[in-house]
Image: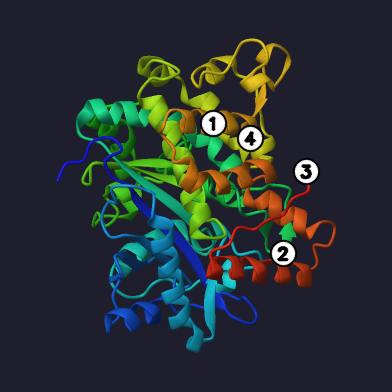
Amino acid sequence: MTLHLFEGFGVELEAMIVDRRTLAALPVADRVLEAVAGEVTSEVELDGLAISNELVLHVIELKTDGPADRLEGLAARFQEGVRRIDRILEPLGGRLLPTGMHPWFDPELETRLWPHEHGPVYRAYDRIFGCRGHGWSNLQSTHLNLPFAGDEEFGRLHAAIRLVLPLLPALAASSPLVEGRVTGLLDNRLEVYRTNSRRFASVTGRVVPEPVYTRTAYEREVLEPIYRDLAPLDPEGVLRDEFANARGAIARFGRGSIEIRLIDSQEAPRADLAVLAAVTGALRLLVTERWSPSGEQKAFATEPLAELFRRAVGPAEETVIDDGDYLGLFGVGGVGGVGGVGGVGGRSVTAGELWRHLVDEAIAAGALDEPTFGPDLRLILDQGPLARRMLRILGSDTSRAAQEALYHRLADCLARGEMLDAPGR
């Protein structure tokens, strides 16, 4: 069945399985899937959703079982899936932990690859890239799959997604700690993501995809260089597939969709879905040319987008954007900037201010359901992304005990379907 733009939504939420008491990674994803399916499998249906494995045994994924026709209502379905998995994990001494990275995971000591179905693919990745690193075994994300039909729709959607990708840390950063340290970056997951395939630069590129807008061009300029570079170490072609592309958004022509990969997992499904609703609302307005013609969107170069993304993984919503050409594509400019905020003459705004503008515009245009998603988005916009709220709670006490208390609280948020409320600015 062919779906056109925004006629379906594929949502994937990843979470880490941890010990209930210590929060150490617990590699039992295969036992969870076996408990549901009656045998070890890589994917099984669960109450209208699906759960599946990932590269490592301590991560599990919940996803829509095929495309959903709307985002509204999905948070409750995913929350019930979380409850079901937590009930399975309880006698195993485990529970689910949210956020984009585990705060004190040691990939050298704790990584255990999935050994069952699809094992050859994971072993090929490990042989070529070495998967005992944070960029492979310690990054949990929320993926959004959006459909297209044909080159014209693909081009419009791909152009819009390229523009939004650098802004995602400002809304969704949730990984401020690595190996027990506050690093100064709010989105460490994306920092390691952009370098995890550095042995072959073609695999990740600049994270922001190249400005290509047809299937033929995409296969020639994005996919073929990847396949060519990997071929000497992958003579059987195990990785010769669209999934080998590790950009921040990848075209899945076999499915007729683009998959966005740069959204950190949040503290509860309601937060994940609120973020996805904001992203989708902004993309709808870009695709329908509310602020700028699609031709201008397509013409925007990769370099400034990649640089903005690189800067945004640090301060997230506080990232200053002063590129007038970029801001103009979102209808931002003139005296007073976004809604009267920003720099003199509107020459600069923060990424958080830009998101507030995008959300307000999407609500006003009917591209974002305010009763469903508005309250949770307002919390994020008012208090900052999850990483900012986490650091506010830690304050000056970054001891292991304080970190454990925070992450137990986050695990409770996931189990109960609650937002992490941390006012203070």
Question: What's the distance in space between the residues labelled 4 and 3, CA to CA?
Answer: 13 Å
**Residue 123 in the image: x percent, y percent?**
36, 66
Give above or below for 132 relative to 328: below
**Three-letter residue code for mark 1:** Asp
Q: Position of residue 65 (x, y in %)?
A: 28, 60
Classify mark 2: helix, strand or loop.
Answer: loop
Q: For residue 350, which quarter of the picture?
A: top right
Describe residue 306's horizontal placement relative to residue 227 as left or right. Answer: right
* Dot 2 or dot 1, earlier in sequence: 2
Q: Earlier in the sequence, mark 1 or mark 3?
A: 1
Q: Nearer the viewer, mark 1 or mark 3?
A: 1
Dot 1 falls on a residue whose secondary structure is: helix
Tell me the number on the disc at residue 425.
Answer: 3
Q: Report which residue position mark 2 lands on.
A: 180
CA gap, disc 2 to disc 1? 37 Å
Earlier residue among tags 3 and 2: 2
> Crowding near pointer 2: few (<14 within 10 Å), some, many (20+)?
some
Q: Which mark is residue 195?
A: none
CA gap between label 3 and label 2 equals 25 Å
Name the residue type under label 2: Gly
Residue type (three-letter) at the residue carrying disc 4: Gly
Q: Nearer the viewer, residue 350 or 258?
A: 350
The answer to whether one can see residue 362 in this image is yes
Percent from the top left, x then y, of residue 407?
A: 66, 67
What residue is drawn where x is 27% and y is 84%?
A: 38
